[in-house]
Amino acid sequence: MITVIAAIAENNALGKNNDLIWHLPADLKRFKQVTTGHYILMGRNTFESIGRALPNRTTIIITRNKNYFKDGCLIANSLEDAIDLAKEQQQIFIIGGAQIYRETMEKGIADQLDITLVHKEFDADVYFPEINASIWKEVKREDFIADEKNDYDYSFVSYQKI
């Protein structure tokens, strides 16, 4: 099972200047719960924005740089190579960034989408691909309102490939 996991705004904004635009502790907590114990695949820019391998997960960094190395991480030179490194796993998460999401969606690689939808539009320099309703069916949604820790209304939305 290959799952794309992302937090996006209503206008599909993902980030700006290689960083998140918003701070939603509930999303970060859920991301940790969902991905812990699994392989996470990400592009080099996403890895460098995080700055380290995330604990209790196997990190695969996708980069075209054949000499790239980060201690404690696996390196792949393509999305397909990254998936091949994790092929024995029952659950693989693709965690970004925009280029990796786009490639994953265009190639039809993912089985499901795990989206945190932030109910606001943001100015961004990277965006998540459109979720095509003829390919993806919403199967679960949990809605939340802003509170003292989370500045925006948000929803956890799960999609399955049709």
Image: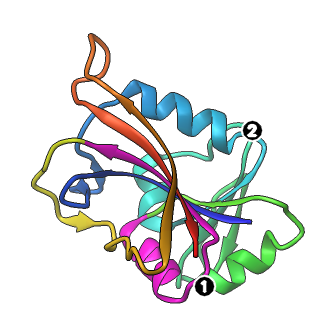
Q: Is residue 115 above or below residue 62?
A: above
Camera-side residue of 42 and 117: 117
Residue that badge 2 annotates: 56
Outermost residue toward the top? 148
In magenta, the rendered stretch is 97-118
Q: Residue at x 69, y 76 (%)?
A: 82
In this rendering, is residue 48 above or below 104?
above
Residue drawn at x 28%, y 23% is 145
Residue at position x 33%, y 67% in the image? 128
Q: CA distance from mark 1 to mark 2?
A: 23 Å
Residue 109 lies left or right of residue 9; in this view the side is right
**In front of the other: 75 or 109:** 109
Local secondary structure at mark 1: loop
Q: With 40 as the anchor, is 108 left or right in this view? A: left
Q: Nearer the viewer, residue 41 or 47?
A: 41
Label 1 sits on what residue type? Ser
Q: Which residue is mark 1?
A: 78
Magenta highlight on residue 101:
yes
137 falls in the magenta region: no
Q: Amino acid at mark 2?
A: Asn
Q: Classify residue 81 as left or right of residue 67.
A: right
SS state under label 2: loop
Q: Quadrant of residue 22?
A: top left
Q: Quadrant of the C terminus?
A: bottom right
Q: Position of residue 16 (x, y in %)?
A: 20, 55
